[in-house]
Image (spheres, rainbow, N blue to C red):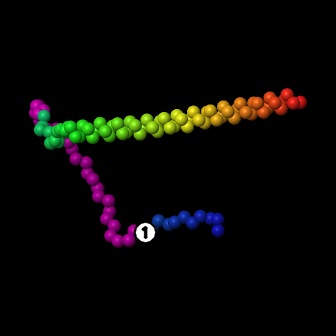
Amino acid sequence: MFRPKIPTMPTPTGHVTPPAVVEPTTVVPAAQTPPPAPMSPASSRPTVQLTPGTVLALVGGGTAVVLVVGAVLVSMLLAVAITGASVAVCAVVLRSLLASETKRR
């Protein structure tokens, strides 16, 4: 019941070809010719032309990203500040309770 069953390797079904033998070949060096002068090929990519509409869209998108990231960061900072203030208030209350308890004795 608690012994694992190890699966057996299945036998291949169908036509099995033996592995091909690769024979090494010799490398014959070619005659040394100077490489041709590099020519700059014509760019197949079209150039990007910024129209006033696309510039406005890019500026608007960038502004939106900056505002969203800023709002997220400010909210995280506010959450940390509120948590710190509440912990400080709890510490003051506990200190006051403990000090008043020792004075009563």
Residue 98 shows in this picture? yes
Q: Is residue 28 above or below residue 3?
A: above
For the N terminus, the image quarter is bottom right
The structure residue drawn at horizontal position 48% and vertical position 35%, both measured from the top left corner, is 74
From the image, give the main secondary structure of the stretch colored magenta. loop
The structure residue drawn at horizontal position 13% and vertical position 34%, both measured from the top left corner, is 40
Query: Residue 12 appears at what percent x and percent y?
Result: 39, 68
Tell whether 9 sits left or right of 100: left
Q: Amino acid at mark 1?
A: Thr
For the C terminus, the image quarter is top right
Query: Residue 50 appears at what percent x and percent y?
Result: 20, 37
- Of 21 and 12, which appears nearest the observer? 12
Magenta includes 91?
Answer: no
Numbered-mark total: 1
The structure residue drawn at horizontal position 66% and vertical position 31%, both measured from the top left corner, is 88
Query: Residue 56 appears at what percent x and percent y?
Result: 26, 38
Q: Is residue 73 above or below residue 11?
A: above
The image quadrant that residue 48 belongs to is top left
Range drawn in magenta: 12-39
The structure residue drawn at horizontal position 57% and vertical position 66%, both measured from the top left corner, is 5
The image quadrant that residue 51 belongs to is top left
Residue 28 shows in this picture? no
Instruction: Farthest residue to the right: give it.
Output: 105
- Of 53 and 19, which appears nearest the observer? 53
Residue that numbered label 1 is attached to = 11
